[in-house]
Image: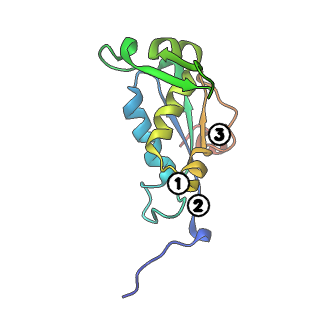
Amino acid sequence: MKTYSTRGSEIKREWHVVDAAGKPVGRLATEIVHLLRGKHKPIYSRHLDTGDFVIVVNAEKAHVTGSKGKKKVYYRYSGYPGGIRAETFERMIETHPAKVIEHAVRGMLPKNVLGRAMFRKLKIYEGPSHPHQAQTREGSKGEEG
């Protein structure tokens, strides 16, 4: 018996469309990361980028449970004294709904070159439409999928 090792030429990338409408942000992020990392494939290797492309639509309709809408705070720091900025989840989902999902997904990916390569395969759109119809299975084969 020899140990199987995935080759780069064996990796086939697919496109998945995930609808964020009515889903909690954390559960949505775990579903997205699972697809980005390629854990749903039998050829998964943790040292290779075996994942697929993920398109997220309806980002503004994602939510959090309980009172986290008011209590969850996103911070960013400019690097200057007094340059820290804070925004609650409610304000962030109104102004930049894609950044809420990006923040959750980025925190679940590896913090190295491999994680950054996986993150580049994520496309997030606020509304129900996206410009990747040709790549998705529905766009290339009609209404079946």
**Considering the image in quadrants, where does the N terminus appear?**
bottom left
Q: Position of residue 50 (x, y in %)?
A: 53, 59
Of the numbered discs 2 and 3, the one sitting upstream in the chain is 2
Q: Position of residue 75 (x, y in %)?
A: 50, 23
Q: Identify the residue at image location x=43%, y=19%.
A: 73
Q: Secondary structure at mark 2?
A: loop
Q: Are marks 2 and 3 in contact (CB under 8 Å)?
A: no
Left or right for 43, reference 136: left
Q: In this rendering, which labeled residue sits more in front, label 2 or label 1?
A: 1
Specify the amino acid type for callout 3.
Answer: Gly
Q: CA distance from mark 2 to mark 3?
A: 18 Å
Q: Position of residue 145 (x, y in %)?
A: 53, 43
Disc 3: CA contacts within 10 A as few (<14), some (14-19) or many (>=20): few
Residue 58 in view here: no
Specify the amino acid type for callout 1.
Answer: Gly
Q: Are marks 2 and 1 in contact (CB under 8 Å)?
A: no
Residue 99 numbered tag: none
Depth check, front residue: 61 or 71: 71
Of the numbered discs 3 and 1, the one sitting upstream in the chain is 1
Depth check, front residue: 91 or 36: 91
Residue 30 in view here: yes
Q: Which residue is label 1 attached to?
A: 51
Q: Which residue is label 2 attached to?
A: 12
Q: Identify the residue at image location x=40%, y=81%.
A: 3
Q: Identify the image quadrant of residue 142.
A: top right
Q: Secondary structure at mark 1?
A: loop
Q: Identify the image quadrant of residue 141.
A: top right
Q: Which residue is label 3 attached to?
A: 139
